[in-house]
Every structure is written in structure tokens, then in C-alpha cells.
Amino acid sequence: MVTVDTNTNNEDHLTNLIKEIDWLEIQKLDDSHDTSKFCCGETKNHEDLDAFIKEDALTQQKQNINVTYVAVAKDTSEVIGFVTILNDRLRVSNAEKEDMKITAKYSDFPATKIGRLAVNKKHVNKKVATNMLRFVMGLALESADKIGCRFLIVDSYPESSDFYIQKGYLKNQVQDQTRTKFIKQKPDGSKDIIDKTQRETISLRYDLLNLK
């Protein structure tokens, strides 16, 4: 089981935040974990999440691109939820800086990013996602004391944004854009590649100096 060992000023927050369900453990992903039965839903977004944990998560972790933590029932190896985190930065508008009383002249601030978070559809409504989010917050607070980290951030699928908002996350005024290419077939059989800019996710932040 993964725990956070700290003697920092955030120790009280960590004690309160990392509260695992009595039947649940959160562990760093390794070769012993069984991801074969993981299925978080039926949509394309769900399929992408399923494919990541089964095919890409461990490889990317070994390459130091990100780190994935998995939720498992105690004394088992079957993954019932996972969260992937990495270092990133958040661009903050002047208005947001004023609201948060940030006096530094920077535009970009250090952040821990939640790259992916998913729960097996058989275990929804069991607070698995909530406890994984608390665990990540504990790691971010530890990072804040050791190397500097002001925010937790996530690019949420629209259908998942309410979950984060209910946990105290706010929508960022500065939303990075995703460029997407569409292929359109003409009547004569030739194809056009249409390059469009569209937002496919919602950028959200949690201020680690404003714990809720």
C-alpha cells in the first residue's frame, strides 16, 4: 500500500485527506497488477481510458513520462480504479491572480496534473474516485513543500467535470486549445483535410493554498 511519509507543515492536511476505504488500497502500478478486466464504460472516451491502463500506462511510467496509481481491493491484484499524474504548469490570467492574491509577476505556475482518472463501472458510487483524488492531493501537497507546486489541474471530459467541481475545482479562464484534423470526402472521391481548433476537454484547477 502506498502512503505518504511527511513531517511538513501539511501533515495535518495529509492525515485528513488520505483516508482509504477499509477494503481499498492505493498502490503504484507494477507488473503484478491485473488490468485485463478493467472496463469503465462504453463510450469512446471510456474505451480510450481502458486501453491506456491495459496497454500504455506501465510503459509510460517506466519512461518517466507519468506515474499511475491503482486502486485494488485488499489482498487482490485486480485494478478497480486508476489515476495517472505528471508534472505540468498552469497559465493564470491577471484577473485570476488578483482573485487568488498572487503577487508574483509570472503567468505560468507549477502544477500537478491528473492525466487520467477512471473507475471500473462495477465499482462506481463506492467513493473509489474520491479516495484516489484525495490521495493525489496528498502527493501534491508533499510536492508543494519539497519542490514547489501551487495547483492540482485536470483536463476533464465534459461529462466528468461536475465531479471535480463538486470537489472544489474551478474552471480556468485560460483554456488551452486542441487542434483536430477532420477528413472530408468530396463528391469526386478526393479528400480534404480540414484543420480545426476545438476544445474537447474542460481545464480545471484546485488551489492547494485554499484547501476545502
Image (cartoon, rainbow, N blue to C red):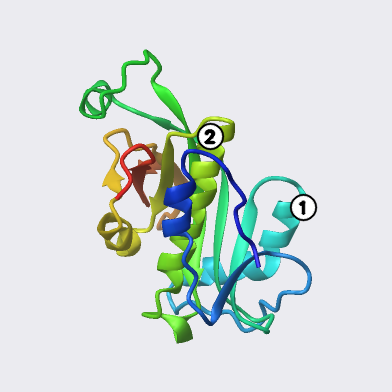
Residue located beneath label 2 in the image: 145
Q: Earlier in the sequence, mark 1 or mark 2?
A: 1
- Spatial CA span between label 1 and label 2: 25 Å
Residue 55: percent from left, percent from top:
69, 67
Image quadrant holding the N terminus, namely bottom right
Residue 33, above or below 105: below
Residue located beneath label 1 in the image: 62
Residue at 29 percent across and 50 percent down: it is: 212
The residue positioned farthest toward the bottom in the image shown: 122
Residue 40: percent from left, percent from top:
48, 77
Residue 9, above or below 118: above
Is disc 1 placed on a helix, strand or loop? Answer: helix
Residue 158: percent from left, percent from top:
31, 59
Q: Is residue 78 left or right of residue 193?
A: right
In front here: 31 or 201?
A: 31
| Camera-side mark, 1 or 2 | 2
In front here: 210 or 5?
A: 5
The part of the image, by quadrant, that contains residue 150 is top left
Residue at 40 percent across and 58 percent down: it is: 187
**Mark carried by residue 94:** none
Residue at 43 percent across and 54 percent down: it is: 184
Residue 46 visible from this viewpoint: yes
Is disc 2 placed on a helix, strand or loop? Answer: helix
Amino acid tagged 1: Lys
